[in-house]
């Protein structure tokens, strides 16, 4: 019996040490790789026709915010207002986020987070969803809401990136009926798998990279993105 207890203690300690090592490595890699900029030679667009987008952070999660309508796309043709509980044509902006489907759907607030949901989203690849939010007014720039001016060509690259993140059927985004936290947001089925090395912030970071915006080489944390947008 004593030998069994000692063996169990040894295995538990070994597992804890391995988990600690992985955690330290993850945070260290995030800090180092987020310090390495990409697209650093490209300045924000200033010529006529430049489009202002935003990147927002709540300290854990980042989103990309774009105008609802531009000469290049009216997003309402892809994200119809009737998918949302109480949104009208006066809403001027849209927020996009990509993440673990179960985490999104079952964790409207951090107080609702359950250990099983957190572990499943972190430890192995899981299904994903796109969170879409209609925003009525233009955001006020601050440290949590960073504006970026991009060219029409860059914006079209961003449109393609966001569009490719949605699952489609007959060219229509697959809406998750009855989903959403409030009157102006909802969820759609997404492409890709979520896991520790490819999370919601990496999705935003990858979109900025493909658009040609200065951002991090790898960005698992919000600050890794926001630091390059000051």
Image: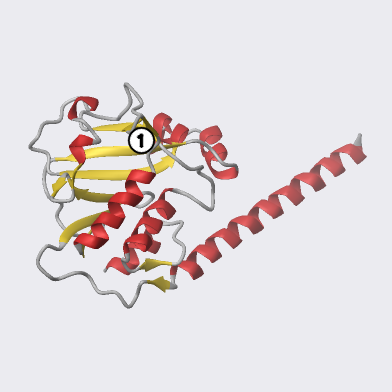
- Residue 76 % position (x, y): 18, 36
Residue at the limit of the structure toward the bottom, as seen here: 41
How has the structure been colored for display? secondary structure
The residue at 34%/67% (across/down) is: 227
Q: How many marks?
A: 1
Residue that numbered label 1 is attached to: 109
Name above or below for residue 1 compared with residue 201.
Answer: above
Residue 190 is situated, as x and y percent measured from the top left of the image, at: 41, 38
Query: Furthest-top residue in view?
Result: 178
Q: Quadrant of the C terminus?
A: bottom left
Asked where in the image residue 228 lies, by quadrant, the reply is bottom left
- In front of the other: 111 or 207: 207
Residue 62 in view in this figure:
no
Q: Is residue 114 visible?
A: yes
Tell me: 102 left or right of 8: left
Q: Residue at x 16, y 59 (%)?
A: 51
- Horizontal and vertical percent for residue 220? 46, 56
Q: Position of residue 45 (x, y in %)?
A: 19, 69
Which residue is rendered at x = 25% and y = 74% of the image?
A: 43
Q: Quadrant of residue 24?
A: bottom right
Residues 145 and 46: in front is: 46
- The residue at the point 31 percent across, 21 percent down is 178
Say few, some or many: other residues with alpha carbon within 10 Å of mark 1 (under 14 / 14 to 19 / 20 or more): few
Q: Secondary structure at mark 1?
A: loop
Q: Say left or right for 20 vs 228.
A: right
Horizontal relation, residue 184 to residue 102: left or right: left
């Amino acid at each position: 019996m004593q030998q069994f207890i000692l063996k169990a203690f040894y295995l538990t300690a070994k597992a804890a040490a391995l988990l600690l090592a992985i955690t330290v490595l993850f945070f260290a890699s995030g800090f180092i790789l987020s310090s390495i900029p990409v697209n650093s030679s490209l300045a924000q667009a200033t010529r006529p026709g430049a489009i202002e987008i935003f990147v927002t952070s709540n300290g854990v999660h980042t989103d990309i915010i774009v105008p609802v309508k531009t000469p290049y796309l009216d997003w309402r043709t892809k994200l119809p207002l009737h998918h949302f509980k109480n949104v009208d044509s006066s809403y001027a902006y849209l927020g996009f986020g990509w993440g673990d489907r179960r985490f999104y759907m079952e964790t409207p607030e951090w107080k609702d987070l359950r250990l099983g949901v957190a572990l499943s989203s972190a430890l192995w690849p899981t299904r994903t969803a796109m969170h879409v939010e209609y925003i009525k007014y233009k955001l006020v720039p601050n440290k949590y809401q960073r504006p970026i001016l991009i060219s029409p060509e860059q914006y079209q690259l961003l449109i393609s990136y966001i569009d490719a993140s949605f699952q489609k059927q007959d060219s229509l985004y697959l809406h998750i009926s009855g989903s959403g936290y409030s009157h102006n947001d909802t969820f759609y089925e997404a492409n890709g798998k979520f896991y520790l090395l490819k999370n919601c912030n990496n999705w935003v970071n990858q979109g900025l990279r493909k658009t040609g915006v200065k951002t991090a080489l790898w960005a698992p944390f919000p600050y890794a993105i926001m630091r390059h947008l000051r």
